Amino acid sequence: MKEIECPSCGEMIPDDSKYCDQCGAELLECVNCGALGTDDFCAECGKPMVSKGKVEKKPDTTVKTTKEEEDLVDYGNTTVGGRIARIGLVLKARKGHIQLRPQDEAIIGRSDSPYEHLLSNCNLISRKHAKFEKRGRDWYIVDLGSTNGTLINDVELQPGTPMKFQEGDVVDLGTYIFDVIVG
């Protein structure tokens, strides 16, 4: 069995450990680079840390064989068994089963929103909280003057000012904290 060094106390422990059996520290793994640590954010790249073993591996999207497949990937789609399947960024809530798939100009909120059926019971999300914007291949969130604000990686958005988000980022809307993943 391979061993790793505990980032907290420096003792060698089995590499499949989720906690150090010497000091008891929970081992966290960076959502972006896979580095181990015990802080909330990675010392290597600054991205959020999650419990070891919870990092979702990025799919291999480097193989493109035809122009049609390249076009499908550009629009967040791919072919699976002859059918078109959507791939792209997803905001996945850390608690509950809420997932928001960005749609250009879609309002995020409790009413007049494609997501209202998911968010209708959250009083800390405004009726029209924020919106998604797509610019080229990049996604942005714009806070719409929400009561409780919108944060990306703990940076509060100024109302009306778009902020880019990408895989590995953390988006905070009301009481929900979302991890941005590829799905």
Image (cartoon, rainbow, N blue to C red):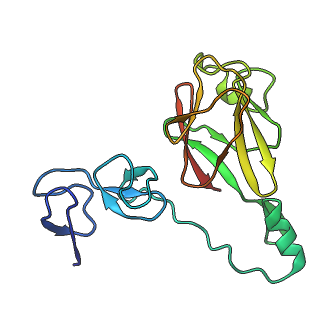
Residue visible at 44% across and 59% down in the picture:
45
The quadrant holding residue 138 is bottom right
Picture coordinates of residue 75 (x, y %)?
83, 60
Residue ID at (58%, 18%): 124
The relative height of residue 153 versus residue 161 in the rendered view (above or below) is below
Give the percent coordinates (x, y) of residue 50. Answer: 40, 51
Q: Residue furthest left?
A: 22
Q: How many marks?
A: 0
State the residue lying farthest toward the right: 68
x and y percentages locating residue 47 in the rendered image: 46, 53
Would you say 53 lies left or right of 11 here? Answer: right
x, y percent for residue 146: 66, 20
| Left-right relation of 17 to 116 | left
Left or right of residue 50: residue 66: right
Q: Is residue 22 left or right of residue 129?
A: left
Q: Where 41 falls versus 69 (above or below)?
A: above
Q: Viewer-proximal residue, 48 or 96?
A: 48
Identify the residue shown where x is 22% and y is 78%.
1
Looking at the rendered image, the quarter that the C terminus falls into is: bottom right
Quadrant of the rendered structure where residue 157 is? top right
Name the residue at 41% across, 58% down.
30
Foreground residue, 50 or 79? 50
For this orientation, the residue located farthest to the bottom is 65
Q: Nearer the viewer, residue 133 or 181?
A: 133
